[in-house]
Image: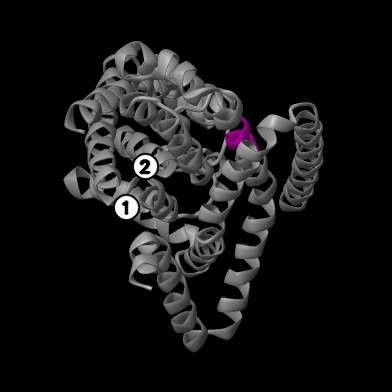
């Protein structure tokens, strides 16, 4: 029992937050709670296919690619080059951040360096090649491109600092 | 009318996602048939990650739903438009962190705020925080990377987002702020 709580502490806390908030919400307003749950279900349905695809991808990534190859391309001794590679991949890929964490964690366990994993997570969320046209349309070319460029550079610096700390 | 169009578009893209998922599942099954010696390790890895996500995912979508209803978007616009200075920076970060929808919703909001006269630095900070520091997502990061990793990465990200916002504002001010304004007016 203690072992279980220790292993799944985060999951237990997340579920507790959801349950307690849901109870409070229900006491305050039934209709708002119903609407919240409707949005929750919609979000769930929308994200489910991506989750399944990513989970299959993780299985194949770690099952087929031997750790030596991952280590060779984005491992510890590749240094900043490894971080640059994952930062570029993170900028191109268009997957919800929520699902990027298990993918990044699997890369890390598969032999990727912490630096490249951080670069990956950070560009994945901050830089979006796929959403750039929309950003340009709404905010103007200059602001959108400057923001993406700065975000990319920031991601690399954050990754290098994290690599030093851990 | 526009809202209706959008919801139809969204439905179509969700259906497309499910079709892609079915194709991926099929392709994966075929691949495993051809490489039976790999199937045990692939399946056990996938099963492990599926379990780790399954125990947090329902709770996270419920939290997203509760946030969306109890913290309406109008509130975000109201606060970010008015405040400036250091207070404006922190309010921009905080409001960006709330899970009020995907990034492509933030762009038109930001454009509207710019038009109303919000500072460029706040808008850049707001969009960046919206993109990369979402509260429920951070719960997933803690689950997979631990609390220390998550907090340090977030602290660094916030510092860089602030520097980025201020720098971009300076750069745009130096060149031509007018262009941006007319750019925004067009839409």
Query: In x, y percent, where is residue B62?
Result: 54, 66
Quarter holding the C terminus of chain B is top right
Residue on which disc 1 sits: B94
Q: Residue at x 60, y 81 (%)?
A: A31
Q: Quadrant of residue B34?
A: top right
Q: Are marks 1 and 2 in contact (CB under 8 Å)?
A: yes
Residue position for label 2: B129
Residue at x 42%, y 34% (from the top left corner)? A109
Where residue B73 sits: x, y (%)?
Answer: 48, 57
Residue extent of the magenta highlight: A56-60
- Whether A67 is drawn above or below A165: the answer is above
Magenta segment's dominant SS is helix
Q: Is residue A135 magenta?
A: no
In the foreground, A26 or B92 = A26
Residue B158, disc: none
User: Is A164 on the left-hand or right-hand side of B43?
Assistant: left
Say which chain tag 2 marks.
B
Query: In front here: B180 or A1?
Result: A1
Q: Is residue A59 magenta?
A: yes
Q: Which residue appears farthest toward the front when viewing the image?
A: B37
């Amino acid at each position: 029992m203690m072992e279980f709580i220790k292993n799944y502490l985060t999951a237990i806390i997340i579920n507790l937050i959801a349950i307690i908030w849901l109870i409070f919400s229900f006491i305050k307003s039934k209709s708002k709670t119903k609407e919240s749950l409707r949005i929750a279900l919609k979000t769930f349905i929308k994200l489910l296919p991506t989750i399944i695809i990513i989970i299959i991808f993780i299985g194949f990534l770690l099952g087929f690619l031997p750790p030596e190859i991952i280590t060779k391309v984005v491992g510890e001794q590749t240094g900043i080059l490894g971080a640059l590679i994952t930062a570029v991949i993170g900028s191109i890929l268009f997957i919800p951040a929520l699902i990027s964490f298990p993918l990044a964690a699997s890369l890390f366990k598969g032999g990727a360096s912490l630096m490249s994993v951080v670069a990956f997570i950070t560009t994945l969320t901050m830089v979006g090649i796929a959403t750039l046209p929309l950003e340009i349309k709404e905010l103007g070319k200059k602001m959108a491109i400057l923001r993406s460029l700065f975000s990319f550079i920031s991601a690399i610096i954050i990754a290098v600092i994290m690599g030093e700390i851990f | 009318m526009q809202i209706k169009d959008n919801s139809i578009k969204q439905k179509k893209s969700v259906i497309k996602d499910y079709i892609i998922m079915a194709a991926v599942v099929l392709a994966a099954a075929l691949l495993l048939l051809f490489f039976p010696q790999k199937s045990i390790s692939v399946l056990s890895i996938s099963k492990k990650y599926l379990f780790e996500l399954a125990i947090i995912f329902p709770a996270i979508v419920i939290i997203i739903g509760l946030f969306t209803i109890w913290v309406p978007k109008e509130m975000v616009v109201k606060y970010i438009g008015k405040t400036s200075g250091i207070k404006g920076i922190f309010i921009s970060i905080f409001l960006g962190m709330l899970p009020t929808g995907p990034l492509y919703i933030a762009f038109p909001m930001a454009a509207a705020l710019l038009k109303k006269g919000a500072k460029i630095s706040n808008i850049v900070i707001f969009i960046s925080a919206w993109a990369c520091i979402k509260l429920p997502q951070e719960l997933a990061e803690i689950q997979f990377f631990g609390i220390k990793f998550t907090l340090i990465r977030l602290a660094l990200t916030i510092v860089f987002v602030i520097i980025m916002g201020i720098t971009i504002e300076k750069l745009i001010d130096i060149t031509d702020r007018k262009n941006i304004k007319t750019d925004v007016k067009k839409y």
